[in-house]
Image: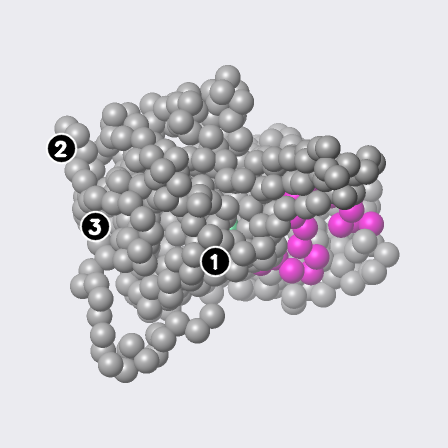
Amino acid sequence: MFCFKNFRQRLNLRYISSLVQSKAYINGKWVKAENNEVFEIINPANGSVVGSVPNMSVNDASQAVQAAKKAFESSQWSMFTAKERSSLLKKWYCLIEENADEISSIMTAESGKPLNEARGEVAYGNAFIEWFGEEARRIYGEIIPSSTKDRELIVLKEPLGVAALITPWNFPMAMITRKAGAALAAGCTIVIKPAEDTPLTALALVKLAEQAGFPAGVINIVTTNKAPPIGDLFCKSPDVEGISFTGSTEVGKLLFRNSSDGIKRISLELGGNAPFIVFNSANLDKAVDAAVSCKFRNCGQTCISANRFFLQQEVHDGFIDLLKQRVESLKVGDGSKPGIQIGPLINSMQFNKVSAYVEDARLKNANIILGGKPLKNLGNLFYSPTIITDVPTNAKLYTEEVFGPVVSIMKFNTEEEVIHAANNSRRGLAGYFFSENIQQVFRVAKLLEVGMVGVNEALISAAEAPFGGVKESGIGREGCHHGIDEYVEIKYICMGNLRY
Ligand code: SIN
């Protein structure tokens, strides 16, 4: 998409001095919390305060829902033509692109993600706005051939109404745009509730949406560190038609349960426990490259991060030697500094969890061959990139998602054995395997019980591809043309007694 970016840069035009906001946005206005409460956002790399935002209550959130409802019902948004919705999304896309550097810096400051990765996330996140800006014009209905002569059977796709989007801290931008792009393209109005650790990136995006010209009430954002009652409001309010959540399986189940009374449309992108299988025929260099980029993306804090590495007997030792060399050379530190590849964990809860899982494996006689300890010299939330072999199946590193920079390795003999082990989990988000055997490639891709499979590839996310899991990893798909389905109702119109 052409955005006049370079042209504007040459003229040195700046529309916005800073995107760091300290208020939330409801009904087209930047507002405080009703009780004036605020909370601080902390840089996980050094503990400094990055900013503060309103600590909103259920009442504030309820006003956001009412604003979104009014904007939807007054037909301000759902009756915009598809081309008009598409144009606004494209304007938003261009503004994000123009401000990519500042958004990346904000993201690094509040999430600890290295700057290069933050830049990557801005490009990835913005690809959803571009994609859904294009898809907005292709939400086609159908005419179904009738079995009687005097009827026409017409199918329309209509926007749900108000959608509440509850998003996580690990991808502070992309998890918002993947939902918001689809919802807005479909004609829904939205209330965003970003994670309490990373609201500044979200507010920056909304500032740019305001500048793009979305009408008041179409996009609202509520910041809070009191998520449970606001989640409950979204589940119970008859004015919210759809909920989309990315986060833990536990919270996803709660939202699912609580919204069942209202028979709400719900889309859940939850945790995984991704297998990463290296078969004897694999190209080991490719497999090791992929293992490093998949495992250490965002310090391992990614739902589709490889969690259990299964290495076939013949390649087990060779893979570990190569991997160890690569992991030893990773640069850990404050992500705003040049060359840093691994930042801190997001907060002390996450840090304690990673430390406890490694200790649990140590106690169960796993073999820590690299790392396995905090890096206190760098700060309170840094953990050393870690490799552990012979992880037993009762270790937490095996049964749960570690969400940290830890490679847990197991050895296997046969394809049958590893497929059984990989599928022996209630999570089924992503799975990866490396094999140069074409027969095995098709067989294993079909046998893995996951929503997304990477074959000889581990960076699989793309705006045009469907993202989502099976089993307890979620419901629904995001991105791709399927992402729109989460925000539309199908209406059937039967035109009867027609005379031709
Ligand atoms: C996630 O961690 O859920 C998002 C990862 C991605 O979109 O690639």
Please indicate whether residue 421 sits to the left or right of residue 247 in the image. right
Question: Percent x, y for residue 1?
Answer: 47, 70
Marks 3 and 1: CB-CB under 8 Å?
Answer: no
Q: Secondary structure under badge 3?
A: loop
Q: Which mark is residue 21?
A: 3
Which is in the foreground here, disc 3 or disc 1?
A: 1
Amino acid beneath label 3: Gln
Q: Amino acid at mark 1?
A: Lys
Q: Which residues are magenta?
A: 443-459
Of circles 1 and 2, the one toward us is: 1
Quadrant of the image occupied by residue 352: top left
Q: Residue at x 68, y 50 (%)?
A: 453
Q: Residue furthest bottom?
A: 10
Q: In the image, residue 97 lies at what x, y percent?
A: 37, 66
Question: Label 3 crowding class (10 Å Cα cut-off): few <14, some 14-19, many 20+?
Answer: some
Kindly identify which residue carries mark 2. Answer: 36
